[in-house]
Image: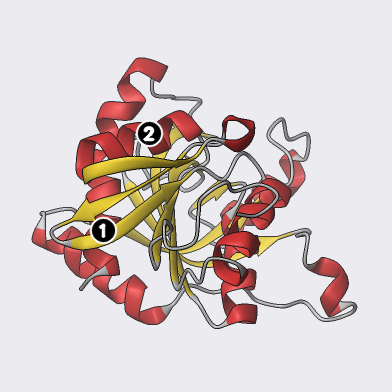
Amino acid sequence: MTIHIGAKPGQIADTVLMPGDPYRARWAAQTFLDNAELVNEVRGMLGYTGTWRGHRVTVQGSGMGMPSLSIYANELIRDYGAKTLIRIGSCGGMQPQVKIRDIIIAMTASTLSTPSRGIFRELNFAPAADWGLLRAAVTACEARGIAPHVGGIYSSDVFYDERPDLNDQMVRHGILGVEMEAAELYTLAARHGARALAVLTVSDHLGTGEALPSEDREKSFGDMVEIALEAAFA
């Protein structure tokens, strides 16, 4: 048991899926896992452990933003021994070829700042996904007839952004989408020798203004969860 995770020793699996929304964690666990058991509800940040095709899996909410994600990822890795952490979440599309409901697999995650920024001082560390997970996720997409977008994303500190000039540069440099957690997840995984990946569903688009209605988001996220699970155990 840690400050923010109330699970007992042995209740957290080696493989953890991390949606931002705790209710999405509950939905994913109840939909895709067998015998899903609630193992954390501290501060309402729900976590469940069950099995998928015989493999133990935990689905733990991370909250919104890198500071919140950092708390849960640190405790999962350092205190519970998690070895594979996959973010499953929504993102905003940035390139014209990226459409609503498309899947983005984040190879890298650019950012202005993360909670780990102070460690590196003058160094601009480049957070990157685990290659084995990334390759397996692409293979899982192709087996489903899904053509994912694979490349760089932008992890932002703010949701209500007022830097259109920065967004223009992201688009200019090929950034596929924007979200708020992956850069810190990739950094922590690198620091502690864990594997990390972000598999994202495009829920809205910064260029067109198009967005999925909230009631449609859950239905559109099923492929993302299954791709993450297949990648974890490929």
Q: Is residue 136 left or right of residue 195?
A: left
Q: Amino acid at mark 1?
A: Leu
Q: Earlier in the sequence, mark 2 or mark 1?
A: 2
Q: Is residue 183 visible?
A: no
Closest to the camera, between mark 2 and mark 1, is 2
Q: Is residue 152 left or right of residue 37?
A: right
The residue lying toward the viewer, choosing from 10 and 122, is: 10
Residue, disc 1? 229
Residue, x 60% and y 67% (percent of image)?
79
Q: Is residue 230 above or below residue 222?
A: below
Badge 2: few (under 14), some or many (20 or more) residues near its Cα, within 10 Å?
A: many
Q: Amino acid at mark 2?
A: Arg
Q: Indicate the quadrant where residue 83 lies.
A: bottom left
Do the numbered discs 2 and 1 sit on residues whose CB atoms are within 8 Å? no
Q: Position of residue 143 (x, y in %)?
A: 10, 62
Where does label 2 land, which residue?
26
Count neighbours of disc 1 (C-alpha within 10 A) and say few if under 14, some if 14 to 19, many if 20 or more.
many
Separation of residues labelled 2 and 1 (CA atoms) = 16 Å
**139 or 209: which is nearer to us?**
139
